């Protein structure tokens, strides 16, 4: 599914910003077991849940302690399409450090919901059922972190938690931002970050 068709199916007539990943980077997502995700500016979490029929026990508008990453900027990112989170039984502190060392970003609530809708579009089911995921690009209150996931009935839950917590059912998900604002002959050769790819993709550090 090309980026234009993907946006049409997920967001109807929304006029998306151009995808900053190259055709070659998009073509290799099958091999790297990843997917492309788009998050429009200013669309809030409650609207995302309504748009895609995601059942949730959270009123994101009422919870004023949740802080978001890039809420006023439309952006694309690449992430794993695995049905379970990465870095299971690793604390949020460890996961954040590892992602940063590899030039990767992480999820916040809006990125996570867009990822879930994209995952469901591709596979016909929701990810992270029975698991929790740290949202390390957002924050909760002053020093906390959000964790989020779906219960066995497919209902989304969210809690503020501690960054140093770890458990066998809690993991994290990364987000790769493109190392360029737009694709051109000058920017196309810039390397994107890869999970497990070391520090080669740190040019994408623009969150």
Image (spheres, rainbow, N blue to C red):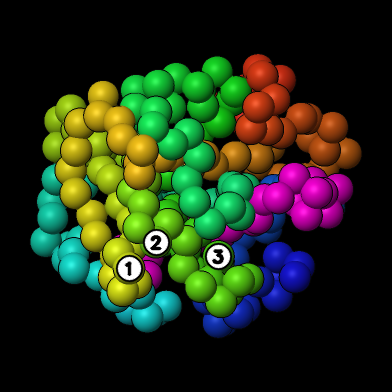
Q: Position of residue 96 (x, y in %)?
A: 42, 26
SS under mark 2: loop
Give above or below for 160 relative to 165: below
Range shown magenta: 24-49
Based on the displayed image, in which of its 4 quarters is residue 119 positioned? bottom right
Mark drawn on residue 138: none
Pointers 3 and 1 in contact (CB under 8 A)? no
Q: Secondary structure at mark 1?
A: loop
Q: Which residue appears farthest toward the front when viewing the image?
A: 168
Mark 2 or mark 1: name the one nearer the start of the chain: 2
| Cα gap from disc 2 to disc 1, whole angstroms | 6 Å
Specify few, some or many for label 3: CA neighbours under 10 Å numbering under 14, 14-19, or 20 or more: many
Which residue lies under the disc numbered 2? 129
The spot of residue 97 in percent (x, y) is 44, 19
Residue located beneath label 3 in the image: 119
Mark 2 touches mark 1? (CB < 8 Å): yes
Give neighbour class at mark 1: few <14, some 14-19, many 20+ (Cα, 10 Å): few
The structure residue drawn at horizontal position 30% and vertical position 52%, both measured from the top left corner, is: 148
User: In the image, what residue occupies the spot 28% across and 45% down?
Assistant: 147
Mark 1 lies on residue: 152
Which of the pair 78/206 is nearer the observer?
78
């Amino acid at each position: 599914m090309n980026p234009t068709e993907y946006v049409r199916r997920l967001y109807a007539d929304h006029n998306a910003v151009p995808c900053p990943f190259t055709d070659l980077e998009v073509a290799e997502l099958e091999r790297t077991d990843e997917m492309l995700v788009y998050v429009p500016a200013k669309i809030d979490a409650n609207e995302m849940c309504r748009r895609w029929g995601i059942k949730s026990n959270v009123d994101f508008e009422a919870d004023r302690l949740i802080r978001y990453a890039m809420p006023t900027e439309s952006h694309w990112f690449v992430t794993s399409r695995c049905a379970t989170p990465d870095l299971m039984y690793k604390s949020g502190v460890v996961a954040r450090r590892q992602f940063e060392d590899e030039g990767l970003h992480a999820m916040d609530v809006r990125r996570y919901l867009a990822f879930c809708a994209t995952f469901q579009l591709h596979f016909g089911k929701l990810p992270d059922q029975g698991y929790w995921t740290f949202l390390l690009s957002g924050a909760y209150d002053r020093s906390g972190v959000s964790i989020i996931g779906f219960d066995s009935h497919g209902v989304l839950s969210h809690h503020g938690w501690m960054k140093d917590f770890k458990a066998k059912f809690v993991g994290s998900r990364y987000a790769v931002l493109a190392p360029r604002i737009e694709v051109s002959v000058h920017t196309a050769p810039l390397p994107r970050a890869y999970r497990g790819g070391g520090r080669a993709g740190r040019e994408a550090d623009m969150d």
